[in-house]
Amino acid sequence: MTGSIPKIPFALPHIPARPAFTVPGAEGRMLDFEDIELWIQPDLGNVRTGAGNYLSITGRKGWRAQSNDAKIALGTGMANAIPTINMAAGVTTLGKLPLHVPGYIISGSYFVAVLFRWASTAVFDATVYRFMSAGITGGADVEFYSTSNRLVLRHTDALSQTAVLTMAANTSYLVWASYDAALNQAKVGINSASATAWSTNALTGAGGAGREIVIGSVLNAEKTQGSQPLLGEVRGFWAGRTPWVAPETDTVREAFLREIASLYPDDITLS
């Protein structure tokens, strides 16, 4: 006995062994970025499923993401068959919630990043595929999404968007967005540590309105359903309420994104 923790030299019946794993060096370094408060990634025994399509993923930094819709499930899709959160487009079933993080609120500055792979059926027309939201449909919220091959960041009624990009179905991407409420400036990027230029830059202030963050979808006003989820497989989602927008934070943002990219060389190449 060491302290109050018993050490038993044999396996107990009916108790599964604790999974053994080694945390990659890059993940250990990513944990040292204190600005990142939320890290959702399905592996290392952190996924729980249950009746009614219940899915729960405990994050690396303590927060938990959960949903209960059949269109959101654990699967694969990226290189090397790593675990992913697979999402089908369309609306969730009435009364079923998209993947959200109870209690994690964005109401000012933030940084978010999503590593995912588009499904083979993704089409890049006017369809909206959401990466993240913090709010409700049409409300005083934050939305980060793709439509017509553009990245769009919306706060309430104002939005900024990039020029047309060249994205492809069945292809992986690392996208990120950050907003600095003090500077009233935002940046987004795709497969690059550098920001992509805005084609239209019209954000006028912070969004969020005290709503919890939703991964790959947005809640309706009644919080009973999600709409227009991302069509593809999400490997990782990161968020923090410290902005990486000002020039002096460029090196921090780049270092963090390059650590992510170093883990997935068969999926993405960061420029």
Image (spheres, grey):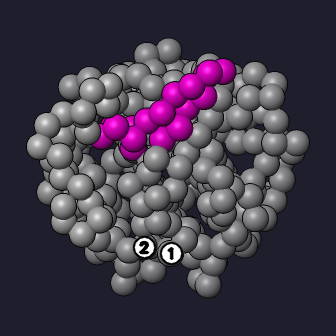
> Can you say whether 128 is above or below 202 in the image?
above
Any mark on residue 177, and which? Answer: none
The residue range painted magenta reads: 41-57
Question: Residue 34 lies in what quarter of the image?
Answer: bottom left
What is the secondary structure assignment of the residue under circle 1?
Answer: loop
Answer left or right for 29 relative to 201.
left
Q: Residues within 10 Å of mark 1 (few under 14, many from 20)?
A: some
Mark 2 and mark 1 in contact (Cβ < 8 Å)?
yes
Task: Give the camera-side residue of 39 and 197.
Answer: 39
**Residue at 72%, 72% in the rendered image:** 205
Look at 62% across and 60% down and name the residue there: 104
Return the mark for residue 242. Answer: 1
User: Real-space Cα distance between discs 1 and 2?
Assistant: 6 Å
Residue 120: image x %, image y %? 43, 16
Q: Secondary structure at mark 2?
A: loop
Looking at the rendering, in which quadrant would you find the N terminus? bottom left
Question: Could one spot residue 198 in this view of the protein?
Answer: yes
Q: Please identify the residue farthest to the front as the structure is shown.
A: 1
Q: Does residue 168 belong to the magenta stretch?
A: no
Local crowd size for mark 2, using a 10 Å CA cut-off: few (<14), some (14–19), many (≥20): some
Q: Amino acid at mark 2?
A: Asp
Residue 19: which quarter of the image?
A: top left
Q: Nearer the viewer, residue 49 or 127?
A: 49
The dot on residue 35 is: 2
- Relative side of 178 to 89, left or right: left
Identity of the residue furthest to the left in this view: 9
Q: Quadrant of residue 16?
A: top left
At 50% across and 74% down in the image, what residue appears? 243
